[in-house]
Image: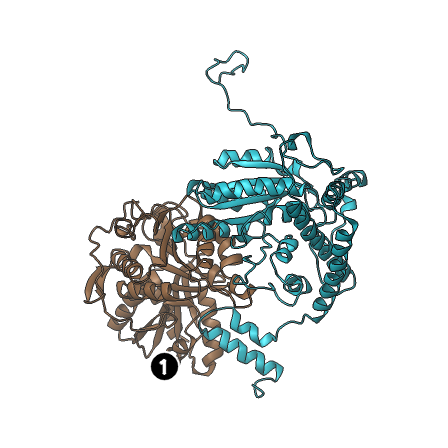
Amino acid sequence: MSATVTDTPAADVSAIRTLTLGGALNAGLTDAMRHDDSVVLLGEDVGTLGGVFRVTAGLRDEFGPRRVVDTPLAEAGIVGTAIGMALRGYRPVCEIQFDGFVYPAFNQIVSQLAKLRARSGGHLKFPVVIRIPVGGGIGAVEHHSESNEAYFAHTAGLRVVSCSNPDDAYHMLRQAIECDDPVIFYEPKRRYWDKAEVTRQPSLPLSSAQVVREGDDCTLVSHGPTVATAIAASDAAAEDGYSVGVVDLRSISPLDVDTLRAQASRSGRMVVVHEAPTFFGLGAEVAAAVTEACFYELESPVLRVGSFNMPYPALKVEDEFLPDVDRVLDAVDRALAY
Amino acid sequence: MTTIDPLTAPAIAFPVEPAEEAPIVRLVEPDGSLTAAADDYELDVELARTLYQEMARARRLDTEALSLQRQGELSLWLESRGQEAAQIGSSVALRPTDTIFPSYREHGIGLSRGLPPEAILAQWRGVSHSGWADDHPAHMHITSLVLGTQTLHAVGYAAGIALDDTDEIVAVYFGDGAASEGEVNEALNWAAASSLPVLFVVQNNQWAISTPTSLQMGSPLHRRAAGFGIPSYHVDGNDALAVHLVTSLAAERVRAGNGPALVEARTYRLGGHSSSDDPKRYRNESDVAEWKERDPLVRLERLLRADGTPDDWFRGVDESLEELALEIRRSCRALTASDFDTLFDNVYSEPHPVMERERQEFRRLTGTEVAR
């Protein structure tokens, strides 16, 4: 992996800045740590190295090794320790190095972090953020390209969010750190180097979807790395004279059903796009929720575009595995044909 | 491929051999006499009486709770008979402000630290998943049923203590079975690598439900600690005074900033794993009889009587146990589950649309929407 964000500027919330998505995350962490002494970072190689994607670059210099902790190579340990620190009043932000490495921590996330508040009768709170670089398309070896949001979205007690652009990366991370609930925070690793403006104020609450553009013929629903794919598909459809909207979910759990219903009612057709396999995935939940919410407004079934139901393949063939603009347009065509 | 004969291999290529079990620390023999090793040990009678009293309360709680389970008042009870010295001997050696992360069998520690019986019984009656909150002055985290998970929480809590620069320590309890879990080994390694104030207390009761320690591990636990860089104590877990002594030493060592320590208390679960268990299916009655001879409560009583503690004092303890038993039975029967509707409040700290939608659905289904 040669992933470097070298142009990370010092965080400055007083001005609108143009940042890479990775740089915006770095600025978000920096500002959160300046704002609140109880914020601590835990992860493999997050200190001296600044993380394998350099998202935490420079933080150890500013905040020291006690708040930016290079942990042993132990994912269950990272999350389990974060739980203990939260019990002590800290707000840990964990970095899981790659999506496929989160499973050793599954027990601590699903059985402990997610349940402890309910188990305690609502007495305890767990302001723990688990950052996970997610998804494929970067030519990585196996276990480095997975999309596992459905596992965590299926677990009550967790919030699951996914940013698609630098502005959301900054503000959603700040909001996630300030949230008193555990948040699984997905970072689209193939978009780490995308540049855009970061505004001074967040435009939406953490749990809200963003309507990127409204559509009259069909609406694409996506999150994280495939929002850009959806926007490209919408542009291509516009050239053919179709008005195709795009919704960036941002929050996977909870789902912003109100926004989905409004957009599905407007266009009558909805296509969900994500990198994860469609089988038992997020798209199925969106389809069910939208169908229940506005069945009579729909002109076609809600369709899903994702990857195939197989382990993530070797990098030379990942382009055939991942949904692209053509596959999204194919689904839009099928929706329009009803 | 060449085959190397270990007998003719060069002497420089010597392996690091695993070590045998270390000698066990014991102050009191099962007959109540002091061991030869306890020659210069000065018996603290007040301490011995305190330990006896707290252990007797733990024993009575266990006995009453098992009866309540048999009467259908509790759905399940995790038995602790025989482990009172390992539990009370260690917990009394801590400061009251040191935080304890229990597994699920340390009921007596909770009682000793001031948790009311109903707080301990609530989970086993099935009215809630925990009967107390972490901010209770008992300084005790709620139980962990997925084995070993609490060891990492203890490590994180200790990391918080280190950041706060206080002289508190954390004591985390687990058993010989849980020691096989990966997370326990991550916790031992992490605590050692980060030099955190954690005291690991292993109650080796020799059985993980039906699986004996011999199938559980290839090296004694106190030896395994050394492999992590953690000093350990191997103590007779049925000798409350010995457990108290080594835990005091270990705790002060941890408190002084020397990183974690481990106490392996070798004991025996005289009852079943739980009220649902049938230990006759996997262990010999003769083994159990042998361990009954080493009953920690009987041992301490013999010592105290030989030392001159009068009958009156024991009668006083017995009377207080009758009061405790009444309180246990009364408070258990009074425990009721909270209103289901309140459960929707407890999943998330902050407002959540799915919770609100499902709460409304629950109210619609139960016809309670108007009343609220």
* Disc 1 packing (10 Å; few <14; some 14–19; many ≥20): some
On the question of residue B230 being in view, the answer is yes
Q: What residue type is labelled 1?
A: Arg
Instruction: Tell me the colour chain B is drawn in.
Output: cyan
On the question of residue A309 being in view, the answer is no
The residue indicated by pointer 1 is A266
Q: In this view, does A8 lie above or below B284?
A: below
In the rendered view, does A176 fall on the left or right side of A119? left
Which corner quadrant of the image does residue B315 belong to? bottom right
User: Is B77 in front, or is B132?
Assistant: B132
User: Is A87 in front, or is B214?
Assistant: A87
In the rendered view, does A88 fall on the left or right side of B19? left
Instruction: Tell me the colour chain A is drawn in.
Output: brown
Q: Residue furthest bottom?
A: B370
Q: Is residue B174 above or below residue A228?
A: above
User: Is A43 in front, or is A134?
Assistant: A43
Q: Where is residue A252 in the image (x, y as percent from the top left)?
A: 42, 66
User: Is A184 in front, or is A212?
Assistant: A184
Q: In this view, does B253 lie above or below B131?
A: above
Chain of the residue where label 1 is placed in the rendered structure: A
In the rendered view, does B143 fall on the left or right side of A257? right
Q: Is residue A284 above or below residue B229?
A: below
Q: Position of residue A84 (x, y in %)?
A: 47, 54
Q: Where is residue A199 in the image (x, y as percent from the top left)?
A: 23, 69
Quarter of the C terminus of chain B within the rendering: bottom right
Q: Position of residue B192 (x, y in %)?
A: 45, 40
Instruction: Identify the secondary structure beneath mark 1.
Output: helix
Q: How many labels does the image show?
A: 1
